Amino acid sequence: MNVVDITPRSTMSSVSQYDMNETTRVIAVSSGKGGVGKTTVSINMALAMAEKGKRVMLMDADLGLANVDVMLGLRPKLNLSHVLRGECDLDEIIVTGPRGIKIIPASSGVKQMADLSAAEQAGIIQAFSTLTKQADVLIVDTAAGINSNTVKFCTAAQEVLLVVCNEPASITDAYATIKVLNQDHGINRFRILANMTQSTLEGARIFQKLVDVTEQFLNVSLDLVGTIPYDLNSRKVAQQRKAIFDALPGSSASRAYKRLADRTDKWSVPSKANGNLQFFVEQLIQAEPRKRQVQL
Ligand SMILES: Nc1ncnc2c1ncn2[C@@H]1O[C@H](COP(=O)(O)OP(=O)(O)OP(=O)(O)O)[C@@H](O)[C@H]1O
Ligand SMILES: [Mg+2]
């Protein structure tokens, strides 16, 4: 298998300790309710991290229509399902996006991962493990809600970033997601990103609502990692198949993404044991979420 060259196009402006450690931070981006901006956030966060010199991979793990590739105007011919069927190697499906970010079109292969034979599983784990040395961060854009695939990705990742916006359903569904991920899957730390806000204060209020309800019923720690303002340009550039961070770097949304990327630098460094993509894929294949009714 050829090794994928994912050297960033942007200049290495900062090389943190965690770059040197050859570990890969895996961040699952999720939400309770759909349409709150997961894919937009995943793409722009990836670009902001790439600008900081990080080698970024973005896995599109959502079967939905507005995929990462569609949003960036890319047309990958192959995806993870071709790899899983043995029709090509992992490096052949990876496409290069703006700022050299590497995109893994995985959506239509995600379900098949659970059905692989032991030998096939070993093959895919091995394939991913070769990517660890070449990626500082893997951002996984998941589907909304508590479906089994999303739960798997959140369980396998080191960080769960939940996107919420100021709608009652978004906050209630975020709570429901936190509850299931905590009570059924033992996740107790969640990064919260308020999106489409009118002010920083609104972001803080959304966060406080989540804290209030989780504090009453759950033993989890929530961390407000940022507030992305509502920006009409975000939609306009999306229609042109561009990301706002690239198209309008000086916009308030782009500056907020930059702050988000800065903030992620302060997160604890993944350990060697869980900081490789082999570990992530092993977890992904093994984690079988228990089904459970969610009651609010
Ligand atoms: N900060 C923002 N300001 C204005 N519009 C935004 C912002 N963030 C996202 N959007 C717009 O909101 C819409 C939904 O965004 P997106 O597709 O990223 O959400 P999603 O959570 O990935 O949706 P789905 O659950 O369907 O996958 C898009 O039209 C996008 O351009
Ligand atoms: Mg999406």
Image: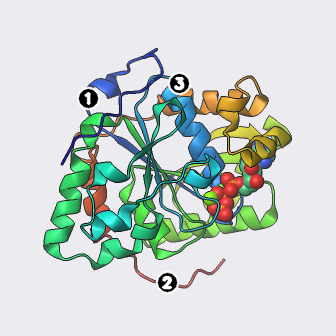
Residue found 36% across the figure and 68% down from its top: 81
Query: Is residue 31 visible to us here?
Result: no
295 relative to 121 in the view: left or right? right
Dot 3 amino acid type: Glu
Query: Mark on residue 292?
Result: 2
Q: In terms of sequence position, does the residue under pointer 2 or pointer 3 come before the other?
A: 3
Secondary element at tag 2: loop
Inter-mark Cα distance, 1 to 2: 38 Å
Give the total number of marks visible in the rendering: 3
Q: Position of residue 182 (x, y in %)?
A: 48, 65
Asked if ligand 1 lies within 8 A of label 3, the reply is no
Question: Percent from the top left, x then y, of residue 112?
Answer: 35, 75
Residue ranking furthest to the left? 119
Residue at 21%, 43% (x, y): give it. Answer: 2
Residue 103: percent from the left, percent from the top? 45, 47
Q: Earlier in the sequence, mark 1 or mark 2?
A: 1
Looking at the picture, does residue 52 appear above or below residue 127?
Answer: above
Residue 21's disc is: 1
* Crowd rating for badge 2 (residues with CA inside 10 Å; few <14, some 14–19, many 20+): few
User: Is residue 236 something one can see in this rendering?
Assistant: yes
Q: Nearer the viewer, residue 278 or 193?
A: 278
As measured in the structure, the alpha-carbon distance from the residue carrying label 2 to the one carrying label 3 is 41 Å
Ligand 2 shown in quarter:
bottom right
The kind of residue on which mark 1 rests is Asn
Quadrant in which residue 217 is drawn: bottom right
Q: Judge depth for marks 1 and 2 and give the one in front.
A: 1
Protein image colouring: rainbow
- Crowd band around label 3 with a 10 angstrom C-alpha radius: few (<14), some (14–19), many (20+): many
Alpha-carbon distance for marks 3 and 1?
Answer: 20 Å
